Amino acid sequence: MEMLNVKVNGIAVSVPKGATILEAARKAGVEVPTLCYMKQKNEIGACRICVVEATGARGLVTACVYPVTEGMEIQTNTPKVRAARKTTLELILSTHDKNCLSCVRSTNCELQKLCYEYGVDSKAFEGFKPVYELDYSTPHLVRDNNKCILCRRCVAACHEQYVSVIGANNRGIDTCIGQPFDVSLANTPCISCGQCTAVCPTGALVERDDTDKVWAALSDSTKHVVVQTAPSIRATLGECFGMPIGTNVEGKMVAALRRLGFEKIFDTDTAADFTIVEEATELLDRVKNGGTLPMITSCSPGWVKFCELYYPDYIKHMSSCKSPQQMGGALLKTYWAEKMGYDPKDVFVVSIMPCTAKKFEVGREDMSAAGDGIVDVDVALTTRELSRMINRAGIKFCDLPDEDFDPAFGVSTGAAVIFGATGGVMEAALRTANDVLTGKDMKPVEFHEVRGTNGVKEASYNIAGMDIKVAVASGAANAKYIMDKIKSGEADWTFVEIMGCPGGCVNGGGQPIQPQHVRDTVDLKAVRAKALYDQDSAMKLRKSHENPVVKEVYDNYFKGSYGCKKAHHTLHTSYIAREKYTK
Amino acid sequence: MKSLEELLAIKAKMQDKVAVRTSSGDIRVVVGMATCGIAAGARPVLNAFVEAVSKEELGDRVTVTQTGCIGICQYEPVVEVYEKDKEKVTYVNMTAERVKDVVEKHIKGGKPVTEYTIGAAKL
Amino acid sequence: MIRSHVLICGGTGCTSSHSHEVINKLAEELKSKGLEDEIKIVQTGCFGLCALGPVMIIYPEGTFYSCVTVDDVPEIVDEHLIKGRIVQRLVYNDTGDKEPLDKSVPVSLSETGFYKKQHRVALRNCGVINPESIDEYIAMDGYFALAKVLKEMTPDDVIKCISDSGLRGRGGGGFPTGRKWSFAKASAGDKKYVVCNADEGDPGAFMDRSVLEGDPHSIIEAMAIAGYAIGADEGFVYVRAEYPIAVKRLSIAIEQAREYGLLGKNIFGSDFSFELHIRLGAGAFVCGEETALMTSIEGNRGEPRPRPPFPAVKGLFGKPTVENNVETFANIPQIILQGPEWFASMGTATSKGTKVFALGGKIKHTGLVEIPMGTTLREIIEDIGGGIPDGKKFKAAQTGGPSGGCIPASLIDTEVDYDNLVAIGCMMGSGGLIVMDEDTCMVDMAKFFLEFTVDESCGKCTPCRIGTRRLLELLNKITDGNGTLEDIDRLEELCNYIRQNSLCGLGQTAPNPVLATLKFFREEYIAHVVDKKCPAGVCKNLLTYVIDQDKCIGCGKCAKNCPADTIFKTDYVAPGHKLASYTIDPAKCVKCGACLSGCKFGAISKQ
């Protein structure tokens, strides 16, 4: 590869031909501020905060997109550069509501941080400022364009998901991000994945905050408020408290939840084990009885909604199994309530999820195992909301001891832990299928071909003499790839795992915010997933069907085998072909 | 269209038709077309000139145009030929027949047809 | 046999002054007189003298009639076409000389003041041929340049020819066209594009529209030549949807060229194939910016992209692309046919050939003019444009539209070319030339253009989206009389910031009208902020309407006219008058000017 020699603030570095000034600067250890830039995703040079001086270039150039040339000398910190950046920030502030005090992103806001660093005068420019109404139309997020800086990272994230329901409307100072023809977000084919909220540098896009509902329930003495946590939360929650990315904080998380006042702390991993045995059973049934193949997982509500919206004719490919969240809620309000002698109406299930689409999922139809209109899950909170509750409660998270889940619904397997990473459901299913089909305790338990952060992974296995081709996709754009293959008849897979977010739940739309420069330089998906795979490999139980709770429930509550009638009633759901744009 | 020749053919066909707009006007043939001239048969004379100029492909240097009463009504149809740096030649009692001679001898040959000129008529 | 051609302008200007009715009436008259086989009516593109439309030219005499109405048609037929008597009252023969020449001698069009100093290369066929006839274009050597290129020249020869001619981009930037083509040729790629930028958006500019309306085949031919030179087999013309006549004629021309095999596969039996498509712009000014235009063709919101990569490397659909403006293309066939030396013989050392300007504003002959580069501004305004009407003084000329600057009266002898204009802080731009007289307030003028850019900013980058708006607000503050000297400094700072930090040319040049007026007319800004006066008497909030008590005869008409009831009778009776004079309450005055325009005694003035 041809290398170019450049100097950044006098520091010599050599970078491959085609590299940008920003890349050269990062290599030289010099940080250049960015707002709109997302590596390979949003290289639009729009915000102009990354301007630098460079030899051979006219005036100031944007480091994020300007390619270096041989011998280029770059200055990132001259008076001219600082003055320009400061003016840019002051102009942005002149159309910003500056309500930092009440902003959920305060102290975690890329704009606020830069304004602080550059010592801006927040009143330097006054004048016309458009005022926007907030979009509360969806259950999963809130758009507040009064805080929007038009970096368009959300637009790029949505585009990366092949959803593209948002873009710029109007022009000039009235430019704003919104939906086509100004319909509300709820009336678009938004899949609720929340990737936009994870990349927003400010508080313009935030998850719908449902913590008040949880606080209210916690102080309601008539309720039995229980919580379940998704597999990936333990790998990410620590980031909200300044811990290194990829720290597994399962013990502290449980301790924090207990201190928040939940009656029981359960693990969605347990539910994930139910998902595997039910899903594997359904798959074998489809294979044996000529059902629709490939069968596709249905754990990810973003993906499920994507399929319903974009491939409504193919919803029969999705497993009818509820997601682990919904299975968890269903079992807690049926099996566990009965066991405890509670009226299901008085059980309030909160789930902590990596995902904004889970907020949509809890309100889906056909999600009431207990009947009587009792929803399986009452509130789904994101990782971010949980961290705010912990802070509000005055819990010093980092100082907490490690505690264990409550055993009634807290025992799980390594198979369930890895649900949080792309390929994890597939691997868990393969572990169980291998044993079920052979009737033996098969080794090895690891299926490395379906691991890793690639958007699409394919593999074929011979299990008990049967050739099984599988595919794993994460991110809705890759889901499109899979579905187009199915549509065209080219797909020869038996089983497909699809997650709506790139990399799976560890990179879900409800996960902790990391500033873009971190997202550009650290592979969040891989580092967070590693925490889960490490936990799996350290566990004694690594196959879902080995989970004693699973055995207990089928033997004593469902009183049947996997896929039996009662299990089906409790743990399965149905899908709806949805229209893309509605009024 | 596959060849330059075809393009040239179209140009040749058309050039004549647009020549009227681009003529250098080195020679101007002016036909008196007032009421008297028209009554005396100036129109066929005018048309004969237009046709002859076109037929002989003289359009790039000859302009045929008309004018009002030249003032010698008894000699109508009257035609004046203006040529750069030369004396004006006035033809009188013109007919379509005489036009052929004028085109052939005067315009192409450069020698005025004296017998049709006003000088000859006066004699 | 056709003996006479009547050419009537069917361009947008004349169409809006009802040239179609004139054409219909003429056809009717000719039919009733039995002349339809002798006289041919040709609807052409723009002649340039739009202010005097509908215009008509009758060949072979070359008589130029202006302001022709339907009622004039019978007279033109009876007198001119039948009897050969020129209808003097309709003849346009303003030679620019002080004394009109002998009226009986018809003035040839090229002798008139408006046309005398013009030199038509890009517009050579406009007003000469029927733009809807490919045959007429061919008769004027049309498609011979393409034939020559395909038969006799290699792509490198073509690029060398264009480079040697010195042709520079006529869209405003002035980038050497040959170099642009050579970059695109040098870019590796199996697919390349040629794009014609016909998204003419400067207020008052209509050069490109006129070429497309008057000579659409020249663009098709030039784009095919460009395609051959860079190795592209497909082209797009991006034209404003607001140009329906241009779109129609271009569509007809493309269809005709296809029928003749001048577009399509294996043109002139060569290996070269070229297809052309039209894309309609929806009227966003920014889509005239080359990368925004490509983004728009691609089907996205028209927004500029960062450069580099330049379009020659990564352009339309990510492929190497040459994008030129209409006028640039219009020059290409002539350069090929007449040679680069011919083209380079016109113009100045660094700016070759001619430039088309849309002349507007406070000038007698508004319209379209094509002049050799290096013509002085004085010649354009005084000789071609006929000077400033109403005996007013020339103050400044604005070029380059909202991206341009202004040339003050002191620099009226500037030879107009790319580099001279840049040197005085102005720019050639695409060719809008707006003349301003002493009644123009330069702060107000800067505001006008800035309002345009503020409206048209695409909103992508911060400096343009917010910065230009803040700039406009500062200007408003100044023209409202609330400005301070510090505001002028802030204005300048913000201008420089926007210029250096904006993403695309639209933003980078948006402050130009402000910077140029600050440079040449700073004292006017100072008068606005220090004296709270608008010297030109334009900025309403800085005006006071005053009644001269000694001139007022007390008729009371002003008081009646005043919509705000701010004029009252005083006790003062001026010497020699019988009635008490009136006075205006400045606090309540809305500065509408109704009193001033209604006073027959010159007693009211604005100060």
Image (cartoon, helix red, strand yellow):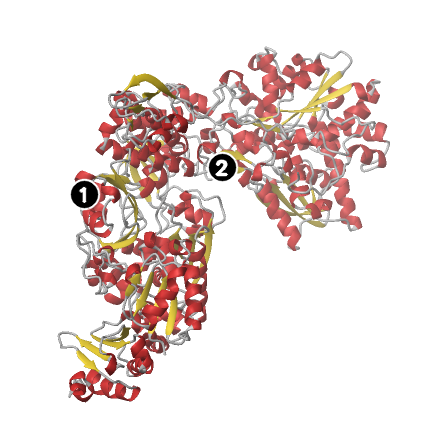
Residue ID for mark 1: C412
Q: Is residue A86 left or right of residue C550?
A: right
Instruction: State the residue at coordinates (30%, 74%).
Output: B34
SS class, disc 1: loop
Relative image position of residue B101 (x, y in whole percent): 24, 88
- Looking at the rendered image, the quarter that the N terminus of chain C falls into is bottom left
Tell which of C58 and B14 is nearer to you. Answer: C58
Image quadrant in which you'd find residue C63: bottom left
Pick the front one: C223 or B57: B57
Q: Which residue is mark 2?
A: A170
Q: Give above or below for A44 relative to C249.
A: above
Q: Quadrant of the C terminus of chain C?
A: top left
Q: Nearer the viewer, residue A450 or C572?
A: C572
Find numbered disc 2 in the image and state the secondary structure of the residue it sits on: loop
- Dot 1: within a 10 Å radius of its alpha carbon, few (fewer than 14), some, or many (20 or more) residues? some
Name which residue lies at 24% across and 66% down: C338
Task: State the image coordinates of residue A1 (x, y, percent, origin top left).
Answer: 36, 46
User: Residue A434, relative to residue A150: is it above or below?
Assistant: below
Q: Nearer the viewer, mark 2 or mark 1?
A: 1
Q: Amino acid at mark 2?
A: Asn
